[in-house]
Image (cartoon, grey):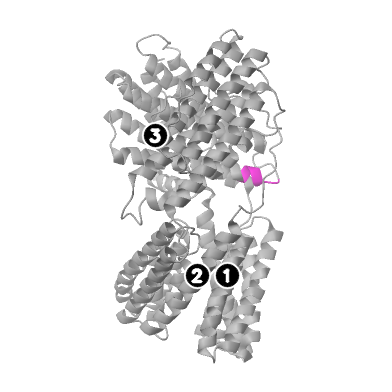
Amino acid sequence: MSSEQAVRGTGSAQAGEDAGTRPLRRFWTVLTASDPGLGRLRTASTTVATLLVALGVLYAVVTLWSQPVTAAVLGVVVAMIASIAVDEPEPGRRAVSIALLVPCAAATASLAAVLSPHQVIADAVFVVVAVGAVFLRLLGPRGMAMGMIGFIGYFLALFVQVTVAQLPVAIVAAAIGAGVAYGMGLLLRPRHPERDLRRMLAALGVRAGSVIDALSRELEEGAAGPRESSRLRRRMSGCGSTALQIEQRLESADEQQLEGLGNDELSVRVFDFELGVEHLVTVALVARAAELPAAGRAEFVAVLDRVGAVLQEGTGQLAVERARRLAADLTSGAQQHGPGRPDDELDRLLRALQFVVAGWLRVVDPSLDEAAAAPDDGTAGPVDPAEDAGEQDDDPPSGRWADTARQAVQVGLAAALAIVVGELISSTRWFWAAIAAFVVFTGTDTRGQTLSKGWQRVLGTLAGVCAGVVVAALVGGNTVAALVLIVLSIFLGIYLMRISSGWMMFFITTMLALLYGLLGQFSVGLLLVRLEETAAGAAIGVLVSFLVFPSSTSGAVRSGVGDFLTDLGELLEHLAAKLTGQRAPVSSAQAEAGALRESFDALTSTAKPLTEGLAGVANRSGPRRTLRAIGACEYHARVLARLADSAAGTVTDPDVCRAVVSAVHGVRDNVESAARALDGDTAGVSVQSADQVLDALDRAAEPLPEPDRDRLSAVVRQLRALDAAVCGLTAGHAPLVDAR
């Protein structure tokens, strides 16, 4: 069966699909792909439901207690922060984290109530509270939530003028809010491990399918511009991110997540599938550069389109059956091509695609055993899932205290200036400036990240002011419509919070316009004051980040590259020992490459202001090229780790062992030289290729039996690709690496 026939193989099965359900299915597919496991959707819906229940309960309490509603506002805020910021899956730890929010809120609210008659002292303590909130971040996510509720609790008690006599009500309200948040979390977020995991696996298929769709368009056009290449990179990044979430979910799970398949084995299969997709992209781009004949390109594009469609069909039984038929068709089609023929390039493409489909089938079909594993193309092989995954180092990174202290000083100074400037703009709305100055330092480490977040916050507020004016005018005096839109705005703001702070500010500002309309306080002037205060606070935060103990984004990227190369050198050292049997394997491929992937993810996040621009305003090509080179290193290192799992201890001949060690150490030496060059001490030094020792390893592998020779040849290919990427990094550009 030819590849073209394979494309038509499932046409009749797909023809019977109900066309009326396609738009809904497509929407659900896009939603689950952008939010694997529906984590953001759950957080947003749970938070909104928690707020509504907390409002109802607290209103009843203050009414029975004959207390003003403002005294219970602290409980609403505790409920909101607990729903958003506390996301620990284990109920016991979640209960502890939520419970700790109550004393934090009570302490700062009490301070505010006692000091509110003394404005200057209250403002000074506000700065101290902001600094303390920063230091609490050293405790991780739990500390982040405690610091946030402490900060918000203080200014909120000042703003609604909670008195000392009202403190018991406020503290009880905080406890009720925490209890409601915990109860709603248990009620609305039940754990269905297998269902949630299958949803995440379906999202991985959609992400991989989108990569193949983008690749198909590039090959069909024959050439790709910067926009097309950027689209392919973004989709590959999304696929890798989803795979990483699945691996982390499986690693942290205490029980088996998928019936019939252990967590370790499924993690390996997901890892193999991700590598297969990346390998396919590499081979396809090389084929495009080699000018694949038009007929062969059209044939392969047709097969790509079919594969992309199958991957995006989910993980149900029908999808599994279609994947099985597709794998069988591709196997038959690949057998029609043979190395050495004019269509040898197409043969490599088809085999890479065959590996992707077989890998996907192993992910969605737990009953599939190793006998039906993906074909061996030198990028992956079976691994013993019982291997010890090793222990993670939970110690905070070196320099964490120094970085936190630096940011605490910045936050303190920015908060003080924001209070002064905010009161000059509006004596009653100054807190908007103080909040903006505090928030721009949340989740940021460098001045570039602070500038990006501040800029997005101002843009979101500006757009929200415009939208708020329009929506408030359209709603008019319709109370029901206004309440529905307020709830919807809160939901969308929370749902999009992790994607962009700008979108969050847009919906929060729109919500405030509707809320003030209900309270009879709406005016365009009030929204403009919010915009002025937010802009002033964000500008002060950014200015302080640039002038007071500034942390350069470029310097942070350089440091991140150094950390990555250090981890890469350590990984190569471990792989050499594993391949030659000098040390018993202590971890699987995921554990070996875990630190490297974490370094790469951290580097990518740090470099965003340089690679993606400040809210889309500007970007630089140099850091993007560096990141692409680092990405190539990370990919080939992960493939090497996977190969080392399958070939561990198979090299026993002393001469071959020496050749392996020499080759790996040659590449590792280049990695270390690159780290020194990028450190600035030996700028301009070019790293020499390790081709000589790699050629020696190729020659040493020739007499080995075929299985061992093939495995070692695959190792050499990946070492060459890694070495080329490292040399390209020091040369200042990312080469097109042929890892076939």
The disc at residue 731 is 3
Left of 578 or right of it: where is 736? left
Give residue 42's quadrant in the image.
bottom right
Q: Nearer the viewer, residue 289 or 656?
A: 656
Q: Position of residue 674 (x, y in %)?
A: 48, 36
User: Which residue does the image show at 62% across and 24% down from the upper left?
Assistant: 646
Decide which of tag 3 and tag 1 comes sooner along the chain.
Answer: 1
User: Which residue does the image show at 52% across and 69% down from the upper left?
Assistant: 409
Q: Is residue 502 visible?
A: yes
Which span is picked out in magenta?
249-254
Q: Position of residue 530 (x, y in %)?
A: 37, 76
The disc at residue 411 is 2
Few, some or many residues within 10 Å of mark 2 (<14, 14–19, 20+)? many
In the image, which is nearer the foreground, mark 3 or mark 1? 3
Labels 2 & 1 near each other (Cβ < 8 A): yes
Q: Position of residue 328 (x, y in %)?
A: 49, 20
Decide which of tag 2 and tag 3 comes sooner along the chain.
Answer: 2
Q: Is residue 253 magenta?
A: yes
Identify residue for label 1.
133
Give residue 142's quadrant in the image.
bottom right
Q: Is residue 303 visible?
A: no
